[in-house]
Image: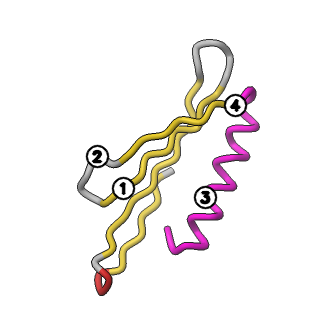
Amino acid sequence: MHLTRTEPDANLHRFYRLEIVPGLFGDWGLVRIWGRIGSSGQLRTDWFGTEAEAKDARFELHMKKAKRGYE
């Protein structure tokens, strides 16, 4: 899932990417990559026991970002 937020008047050009990936030991990771459009950004991975937990966390983050203006 790739989200962007641009506000040219404020010189704000951001992206936020969310991906769910399987782990080596049956766990699931929610990979978050964010930063200014055109940069490589920062990366963080949160690990969950099930795919459903990772999807719930992704949905929660998606709603938070939508409230802040990401599309």
Q: In the picture provided, is 6 more to the left or to the right than 32?
A: left
x and y, in percent, of residue 12 in the image:
33, 74
Q: Please tell me whether residue 62 is drawn above or below residue 13 in the rendered image.
A: above
Compute the Cα span from label 3 to label 4.
17 Å
Please, is residue 55 above or below residue 16 in the view?
above
Give the CA distance from mark 2 to mark 4: 25 Å
Magenta-colored span: 48-71
As shown in the figure, which amino acid type bears the numbered disc 2? Ser
| Nearer-N-terminus badge (3/2) | 2
Q: Residues within 10 Å of mark 2 (few under 14, many from 20)?
A: few
Q: Residues within 10 Å of mark 3 (few under 14, many from 20)?
A: many
Crowd around label 4: few <14 · some 14–19 · many ≥20 (10 Å): some
Q: Which residue is mark 3?
A: 62
Q: Which residue is mark 1?
A: 35
Residue 64 image label: none
The majority secondary structure of the magenta stretch comes to: helix
